[in-house]
């Protein structure tokens, strides 16, 4: 079925299935539909890939399907995506909902505004670090610290935490300077754990690569 013509709409709450130009079949519940722009908003319930298709948000193998958890990993949530029907080759209505949809949930506009501002500040901080020539290790450490302590910022290539602790390149524990006390001790522990986790991850990747190479040698 082509994109809806005059008088044809997708009712909120209906379950639909659509095939994208990339060979990805999406099934979900209609959250919203704008006829003028042909934009369909779906709460994703299932993803199916045709054989030879690309990887999808559920990280499925080809010719497989699976109920989709949200990308956040929370089981009680679903991903919501916008679909441009100009890039959809097929749309099927699985279950059409004709009754009046329930009222929309109220939005906490203040909370959304704060979240948008925080996200903007984070992106600007990342852009600054890149433009200043900060190493990848420094950027990763900053992100780790920022998850625990929001009061951290860049000062040229130095990380400033709570205006009390300065972490200079190469961003190791011994590069954490400040007045001795709980703040400095806490930051040092975060830095120490960060690099310990990074090294552990690298070690695991090396082991997996060696095992893959070993398996490949045996199979040949």
Image (cartoon, rainbow, N blue to C red):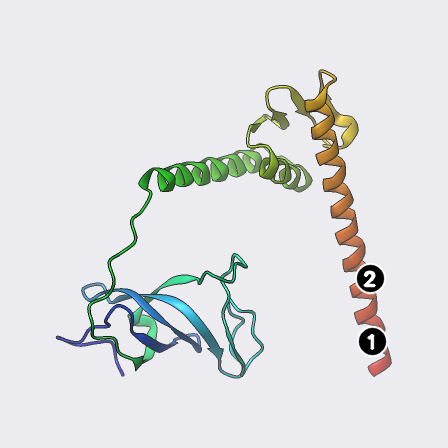
Element assignment for label 1: helix
Q: Residues within 10 Å of mark 2 (few under 14, many from 20)?
A: few
Q: Quadrant of residue 164?
A: top right
Quarter of the figure that contains the N terminus:
bottom left
Q: Classify the position of the C terminus by image quarter.
A: bottom right
Q: Is residue 220 visible?
A: no
- State the SS at label 2: helix
Please tell me which residue is depicted at 56% across the width and 69% down the height of the picture: 59
**Gap in angstroms between the C-alphas marked 2 and 1:** 12 Å
Would residue 213 be found to the left or right of residue 31 on screen?
Answer: right
Find residue 8 and report its horizontal and vertical position in percent: 17, 76
Seen at 61% across and 36% down, the residue is 148
Report the residue marked by disc 2.
207
Q: Which residue is mark 1?
A: 215
Report crowding for label 1: few under 14, some 14 to 19, many 20 or more residues within 10 A (C-alpha). few
The answer to whether marks 2 and 1 mark residues whose Cβ atoms lie closer than 8 Å is: no
Residue 216, given in percent of the width and then of the height, sits at 81, 76
Mark sitting earlier along the chain (2/1): 2
């Amino acid at each position: 079925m082509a994109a809806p013509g005059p008088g044809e709409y997708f009712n909120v709450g209906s379950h639909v299935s659509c095939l994208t130009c990339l060979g990805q079949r999406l099934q979900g519940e209609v959250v919203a539909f704008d006829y003028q722009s042909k934009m369909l908003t779906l709460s994703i319930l299932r993803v199916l890939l045709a054989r030879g298709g690309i990887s999808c948000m559920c990280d499925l193998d080809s010719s497989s399907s699976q109920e989709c958890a949200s990308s956040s990993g929370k089981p009680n949530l679903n991903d919501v995506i916008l679909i441009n029907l100009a890039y959809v080759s097929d749309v099927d209505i699985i279950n059409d909902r004709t009754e009046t949809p329930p009222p929309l949930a109220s939005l906490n506009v203040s909370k959304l505004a704060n979240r948008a501002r925080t996200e903007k500040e984070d992106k600007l901080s990342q852009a600054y670090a890149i433009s200043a020539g900060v190493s990848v290790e420094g950027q990763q450490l900053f992100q780790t610290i920022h998850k625990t302590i929001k009061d951290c910022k860049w000062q040229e290539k130095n990380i400033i935490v709570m205006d009390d602790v300065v972490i200079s390149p190469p961003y190791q524990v011994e590069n954490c300077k400040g007045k001795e006390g709980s703040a400095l001790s806490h930051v040092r522990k975060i830095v120490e754990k960060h690099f310990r986790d990074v090294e552990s991850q690298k070690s695991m990747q090396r082991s997996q690569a060696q095992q893959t190479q070993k398996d490949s040698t045996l199979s040949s």
